[in-house]
Amino acid sequence: MTSTRHLGLDLGGTQLKWAVVDFTDAAWGRIATDRVPTRVDAGAEGIIDQLGETASAAAAGWGPIASVGVGIPGRYDAAGGRVIMTPNIPVRWEGTHLVARLEQLVGVPVHLLNDARAFTLAELRLGAGRGAETLVGMTLGTGVGGGIAIRGTLYLGRDGAAGEIGHQTIDPDGPLCNCGNRGCVEAFARADVIAATCGTATVEEAVRAAAAGDARAVDGLAQVGRYLGIGIANIVTVLTPDRVVVGGGVAAAGELLFAQVRAELDRRVRMTGTATVELVRAELGIWAGAIGAAIHGAEAAAKAAGPA
Ligand SMILES: [Zn+2]
């Protein structure tokens, strides 16, 4: 029996979450999770120091750690080990080699992954995506993140950006999206838009109000579900996934949201069947990003080391 432990760091705009997972006889297990407030004002170097300190503390309690994965809320350069931009963490990353510096601090291989791809990988290995062959992950929060796994493996594309299903255009003249395009899924289904559509201050309030029968919230969630459903229908037509996992606060609305998504799938997907597409809620909650980052760090380190 071989067993190794791996650390995932999920760098968020307000919290830095971490997870230690173990890999024993080809099976993943969750060992420990925790979080600290992100030092967003510390600049790029300060944030890297915090990643190093957090990794050292986690390793001291739950190690030894064989690899580290870092979930990035934005774009990164995998080959160069650098962050390109993080929309919700206003930090200048230019000239900062995150991977090289963090490897110096922790002494084990470090790999980067977008946080929504980390969410998808975690759900694939340990959550609601277990056993799926082709999986689509969608996480609804400040933005709308996405990820794709094909034949049981996360698909990253040329530069790690494959799976940005929240940024497909579903209304050519729709509202401006934070990415600069118009009419993306995200422009209709990110947290602040959902709350505004439902007439509430937050998504959590929207879910509660809809569950209590508030007509505006019920209609608002149905409208959000419609746009989400159009986006998911496009992906189902292109990829014919066997499962779609939806996470983030609004997923707690359950059928108030999913019924409309399913209606759009039935209405729009004509070239393949939808009866076998499972639409499920994510299982790993707020820890999915950290767990997925840990698993990616382990898988990428194993790949870099070559066949065993
Ligand atoms: Zn967009």
Image (spheres, rainbow, N blue to C red):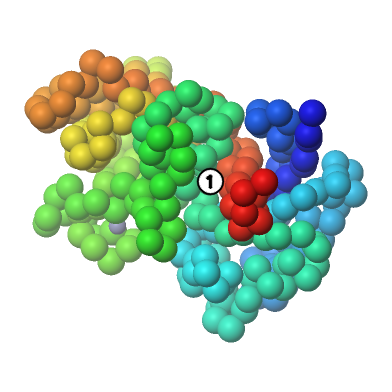
Task: Classify the position of the N terminus by image quarter.
Answer: top right
What residue is drawn where x is 62% and y is 79%?
96
Q: Quadrant of ligand 1?
A: bottom left
For the residue labelled by badge 1, is the local secondary structure a helix, a strand or a loop?
helix
Residue that sits furthest to the right in the current view? 60
x 17%, y 47%: residue: 170
Determine whether, in the image, residue 269 is placed left or right of residue 32.
left
Residue at 32% across / 63% down in the picture? 179
Q: Position of residue 54 (x, y in %)?
A: 79, 56
Foreground of the two, 107 or 137:
107
How far from the left and from the top, in percent, is residue 153? Answer: 46, 40
In front of the other: 75 or 158: 158
What residue sits right under mark 1 in the picture? 118
Q: For the point 21% across and 21% down, which residue is it?
A: 274
Residue at the far bottom in the pictured view: 95
Q: Nearer the viewer, residue 301 or 122?
A: 301
Q: Quick check: 131 above or below 34?
A: above
